[in-house]
Amino acid sequence: MTGAATRPIVTAPLFEELDGKLIELLESLNERDWTRATIVPRWNVKQIAAHLLDTALRRLSLDRDREPPPADAPRIEGPADLARLVNDLNARGVEIYGRLSGRVLITLLRVACRDLREHFLSLDPMANATWSVSWAGEDRSLNWFDIAREFTERWHHQQQIRLAVDRPGIMTPPLYHPVLDTFLRALPFAYRFVSAATGDVVTVRIAGDCGGTWHVRKMPEGWAIIDEADTAIGSVTIPQDLAWRIFTKGMPYDEARGHVTVEGDERAATAVLKMIAIVG
């Protein structure tokens, strides 16, 4: 498949701006802000910042420096095993780095974010990645997709902090559209259990200046993203301010359904509202 399904999403050059906005945001927080609850269960603002530090350091150690995993690391034999491992590692990291002061977190994040983006810029985007994008159903991914996945992680966690402390978001087309485009590459995998006739198309629209339109067509071997479609059996329009929350477990299906517009086949159109573009 060519076109929309395989077109690289170039995000490595965008990390510097995203990281700069994170540091600027964290430096503006007062003592109370650091302890504010977020939409992430059991994590406050400081704990999300701790998570961002932990994942950057882990990524550098494992991917850049090729630090071997512990000898007692569990075997990964499926998505459930991967989710358990990721959730356990995340919980440990937040417990450790969440004990640091905000000032220390900012200092360490400056270094970790800088080194991580330099690592991503050094990679051949078309070479095989160390890590596959499991939530898109891939057993092997190219670097550009893995890097774009990491960009969505760091974007949506920063957005969670901004939501918690009531600061302007980072929903600008240069930063947010690549996040949405990356999320929606998971459409074929998310629709794998949706029955339809060969040739049927479902259209997903994200409304707003950062959004766009994506189409997924039923092929004999499964679903595939296509560039254009004249007709669709169903379509859904999602406000851009809610899309990221829907795809990162920040808004349950029933709540999301009340904020979207559906035309045509309800079952097919709303399947995207159950799509999860994170691990864990």
Image (cartoon, grey):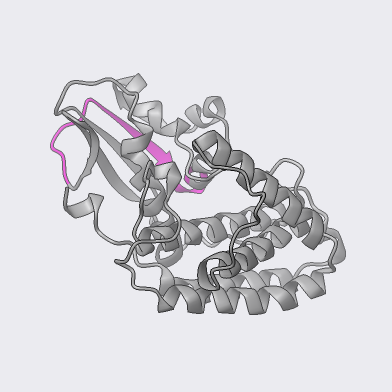
Give the tally of numbered discs.
0
Front position in the image: 267 or 2:
2
Residue at the (44%, 45%) spot, across then down: 134
Q: Give the image location of residue 82, x and y in percent.
A: 55, 42
Instruction: Look at 54% across and 56% down and name the residue there.
Output: 153
- Foreground residue, 211 or 7? 7
Quarter of the C terminus within the rendering = top right
Name the spot of residue 67 as percent of width and height, x first: 59, 67
The image quarter in which residue 97 lies? bottom right
- Is residue 99 found inside the magenta-colored segment of the image? no
From the viewer's perspective, is residue 144 above or below residue 78? Answer: below
Q: Which residue lies furthest to the front in this view?
A: 71
Q: Is 240 a magenta residue?
A: yes
Q: Which residue is depicted at the point 40% across and 63% down?
A: 173
Q: Give the range drawn in magenta.
A: 228-243
**Observer-nearest residue: 279 or 174?**
279
Report whether 148 appears left or right of 114.
Answer: left
Instruction: Tell me the residue at 74%/78% (across/down).
Output: 107
